[in-house]
Image: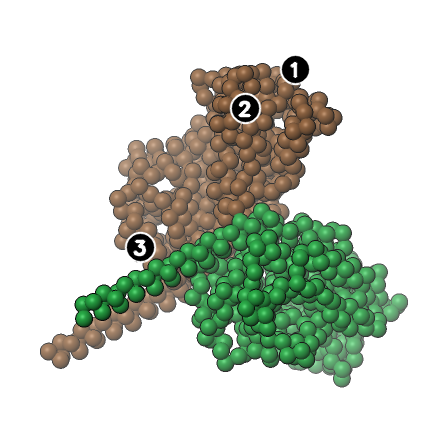
Chain colours: A brown, B green
Amino acid sequence: MLAKRFLVLLLSVSTTFSLLAQENADAFFIKKIHDSALTEGRAYDWLRYLTKEIGGRLSGSPEAAAAVEYTKQVLDTLGLDSVWLMPVMVPHWVRGDKEVVRISASVMGSMDLKAVTLGGSVGTGMAGISAEVVEVQSFEELEKLGEAGVKGKIVFFNRPFDPTQLNTFRAYGGAVGQRANGPSEAARYGAVGTLVRSMASALDDVPHTGGLRYRDDLPKIPAMAISTNDAELLSKALKAGPVHVYMETHCTQLEDKLSYNVIGEIKGSENPDEIILVGGHLDSWDIGEGAHDDGAGCVQAMDVLQLMKRLNYQPKHTIRCVLFMNEENGLRGGRTYAEEAARLGENHLVAIESDRGGFTPRGFTVDGNSHLFVERLTAMQQWSPLLEPYYLHIKKGGGGADISPLRAQNALLVGYEPDSQRYFDYHHTAADTFETVNKRELELGTAAILSLVYLIDQYGLK
Amino acid sequence: MLAKRFLVLLLSVSTTFSLLAQENADAFFIKKIHDSALTEGRAYDWLRYLTKEIGGRLSGSPEAAAAVEYTKQVLDTLGLDSVWLMPVMVPHWVRGDKEVVRISASVMGSMDLKAVTLGGSVGTGMAGISAEVVEVQSFEELEKLGEAGVKGKIVFFNRPFDPTQLNTFRAYGGAVGQRANGPSEAARYGAVGTLVRSMASALDDVPHTGGLRYRDDLPKIPAMAISTNDAELLSKALKAGPVHVYMETHCTQLEDKLSYNVIGEIKGSENPDEIILVGGHLDSWDIGEGAHDDGAGCVQAMDVLQLMKRLNYQPKHTIRCVLFMNEENGLRGGRTYAEEAARLGENHLVAIESDRGGFTPRGFTVDGNSHLFVERLTAMQQWSPLLEPYYLHIKKGGGGADISPLRAQNALLVGYEPDSQRYFDYHHTAADTFETVNKRELELGTAAILSLVYLIDQYGLK
């Protein structure tokens, strides 16, 4: 009896020791990943090229084509097992040259506002649109005004971000409906145009573009965003008396174009059929350089593979980097990718997306509709002691737009979460430039993602 | 017996409920603090004035005097119980107009380097200094070179930051000895001047100033910093052959000047004699605007009192905001403050300093030499569930330079810890401007500090 007890004790001690040894080995390798990302990472240089040499990369543009070519060529140099392009038909919207929002008459006089057309908007024609402005904060207010208050006017949606939201993406979520659905909602009551307050955390002079969704059963009216400072100014003018605005934009929707998702992978040694995907989206809006949104996510995903090779790490699972095309105005890349995965019967264990900027790491948010979701999240959270030294948490939360179509295939969806405070200073603006990305913050993001990939690859999700 | 057990159970349930109720009340108030900081904070506007209207505020300068006047006037408007100035005699060093570091001869030709004189340096005189350069990475290397290798030369200290340090302050700690003690160490072997690689995380063109400490028993030789890019360039030139450099700087040390610590407080209702101090330093280097270092810390400390009044929070302990003068080149404000506290027999329960920039919050580091230190740290860490929703940790670590003299009086020293990745892009440079501070990040810092002050005020440190 005593002998048996001793044996049990001995076994338990030895298990404990080997568990500890494994945990130390993991801690050591995660430190190595961080060291390597901070000294041998290539993400920052790749981002410089994507932003300063290529620039804004809206789907269908020459820049988007150049970005496909550039990232494919970079992946080709990394010694991966395969690199390929996946054809995707994308919408092709072009902004045109001139964008004007002018207060043509008000008690405060006339002045030009800092404005930018929303992606997907129809143009105003050469004559532009001149109309009186009516301001609302919500669709409820719009409905109350009804046709009597809206018909023939320009509707100005002016609901600001809620500054008390700790995560700025929640504030964005509370305001972005105005931009996406406002134009059709205004058209429902006979509006001739819409202006929207920029989706921004700060009061500044930078207008933010972004996509809109016209309803097919309603007239399409032009839609433009004005800077938050100018939204305040316009609102002030409206409080003082009637305001007339002149809008002019020459954007237009062309025929769909052939483009590509860019893909590279390292084949798994033990479970080659189970895929761990890391990705971002290669397209961006046209008015900035697409640095935080989402050049950062692309170069981080590419650097995950680069560092894996540099660290001589042979994964058990297949690790695939996917640079999705057309997140911003169609999600065609994400949809096509999931369709292809279904057609080929591929098994995506996890898909990790980095599309919240190249800021300092906070952790990961995890989503999924598999019946195994809670179990998998709990399994991942057991790695917290290994990730906490790097300030990385694992919480329930969103994955990412491009990977969301993989939900139906039971992939676990993981969103890399950097700090969110500065994101909506740059998002969809001319200010989203390379200079606003800090090299170390970007590299620590790569290290965070690779650390998680390593743990999933080592232990799966059981 | 059953009745007694029931009673115990009942009591325990009721205690649990009231503990939970208290925890909920605390969580509610901490949320209110954050909401208030993000919507009614004044820190950002005060910082704009300190940086854009006043600018760099080196001790003894007119700008430092203006900053004393401005912050005193602001505190006077907050309805505090007292506001006063504490006289401090400060060193008065002035930079002079012209600063030149020129490669006058090398195989790469001649060129000017991006350079700035170190604070406290002696000048070169009108003739400047021309000498051959010798590069070292450490004092050990310098010692090996000895007089034979150093005499009559300019010593170039070129040890870079260790990029693998997760916290950039550790990388700074590993390099800053070259700047602080390098000039005297070089003079020990007969050097005529020193150049130091800027204390920076990044490779860029921005030179970083900072203080040096001359030894009284060694000659004082001029000392200047060059940008990290130019340090790389100079090092490359030295690998190719001999390099001669011309240094010119007209800085000079004037007589000490009268200046002030700026202080405001709200008297405690229950323990007025126990002080909870929040502070930053009002002086800055002269070449930038002193935005992150340490305008941010000052306006956060001021805003802690402002928000307390706005929230109608009557503290039990005395809450004192102290804006210390002369952290950068003398620490006279911090020393004078501690001497005064000792003279008056004041009891500082805790001193919290914000002097690591206005970046997004990470938490607090706690230090102290009281025999109660471990106990107090443990007590504070029990608040973690209340602080974790705001990503705030409490860890052992440094307090802050200005509050460090209070250590001998058994104050618990707490350093507010924002994210460190970008700090050494701006520290002690012309790039430390208002524009590099994000309003929300700054405000969340205020909220973090006020939340901690609230918990200490409510529960003490037992």
Disc 2: CA contacts within 10 A as few (<14), some (14-19) or many (>=20): many
Q: Is residue B372 above or below residue B75?
A: below
As helix, strand or loop, the secondary structure at mark 2 comes to loop
Total numbered badges shown on the rendered structure: 3
Element carrying mark 1: loop
Residue at figure coordinates x 60%, y 80% from the top left: B408
Residue at mark 2 to residue at mark 1: CA–CA distance: 16 Å
The residues tagged by marks 1 and 3 sit, at their Cα atoms, a distance apart of 61 Å
Q: Which residue is mark 3?
A: A379
Percent position (x, y) of residue A180?
Answer: 49, 29
Residue A121 got which mark?
Answer: 2
Q: Residue A127 shows which numbered tag? A: 1
Query: The residue under label 3 is which amino acid type?
Result: Ala
Q: Give me the residue at 76% from left, 71% from top.
A: B87
Q: Earlier in the sequence, mark 1 or mark 3?
A: 1
Q: Is residue A272 visible?
A: yes
